[in-house]
Amino acid sequence: MAVQMINRVVIGLLLPLILLGLSACASVPEGTEHIADPLEGMNRSINRFNTDFDNTIAKPVAKGYQAITPDPLDRGFTNFFHNLADINSAANNLFQLKPGRAITDVGRLCVNTTVGLLGFIDVASDIGMPEYKEDMGQTLGYWGYEESTYIMLPMLGPSTVRDFIGKTGDVFMNPIYYTSEGIYWTLLAFRYVDLRADLLRATKAVEEAAIDPYAFVRESYLQKRRFDIYDGDPPLEDDPFLDDF
């Protein structure tokens, strides 16, 4: 039992990092950020391994899933997992002293779980309820742990020390963690394949356009997380050139 619990926590910690890393490739906010990458040599080696893993296993599986899954069903699966994430988002909005957003998250959860058939239909978005997507990494950033060393994890992709620590709390707020062994592993695997399929086009664009894919993913990930922490409105960084005027 103890070994099974440890396995769940470890995988529960790591899978969200994959999702964050992949989603960073889908949308790159404008702006710059101080890059804390003292482990760049090791990170680049791990990134090369990850690229081989993705090309050999993850991407072919995702393409197969996309080929056999009708678009409405694919969207329904994505909505289902987003609905579960609203639980974690509500809790972290409370931790960040944003009760209004937390109430909206709970409202989304109630609407989509009932009217939206367990979240397969995103009724809440259709009626104008925003989706905030908060997590413990953002909460740590909100309370001052903003700058963090960038790390590339084997098979799991980009992260920071802060985000890795933050996922400890996120694991226990995910209802999937409390399901039976078979359901737990099935849902986790399915979640990864579903997201990887959704981002096939975005990652292809990165591969074709980026001169240095490693640097592109690193900067995209760090920028996205900075924007997430500041709810899309990060403060302007100090410019020493402007100080002369």
Image: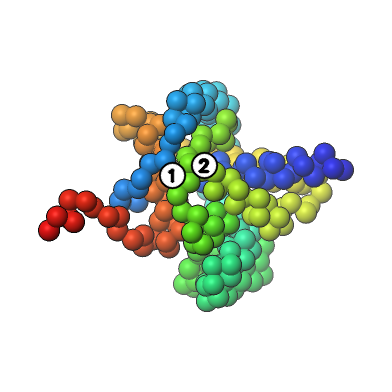
Locate residue 207, reporting x and y percent: 38, 31
Residue depicted at 31% across the width and 48% down the height: 32
Amino acid at dot 2: Ser
Mark 2 residue element: strand
Mark 2 closeness class: few <14, some 14–19, many ≥20 residues within 10 Å? many
- Specify whether residue 240 is in view: yes
The image's mark for residue 159 is 2
Quarter that holds the C terminus: bottom left
Q: Quadrant of residue 236?
A: bottom left
Residue depicted at 58% across the width and 57% down the height: 136
Mark 1 closeness class: few <14, some 14–19, many ≥20 residues within 10 Å? many
Direction from residue 49 to residue 242 in the image, left or right? left
Residue depicted at 56% across the width and 34% down the height: 153
Which residue in the protein does label 1 denote?
221
Mark 1 residue element: helix
Q: Earlier in the sequence, mark 1 or mark 2?
A: 2
Direction from residue 174 to residue 148 in the image, left or right? left
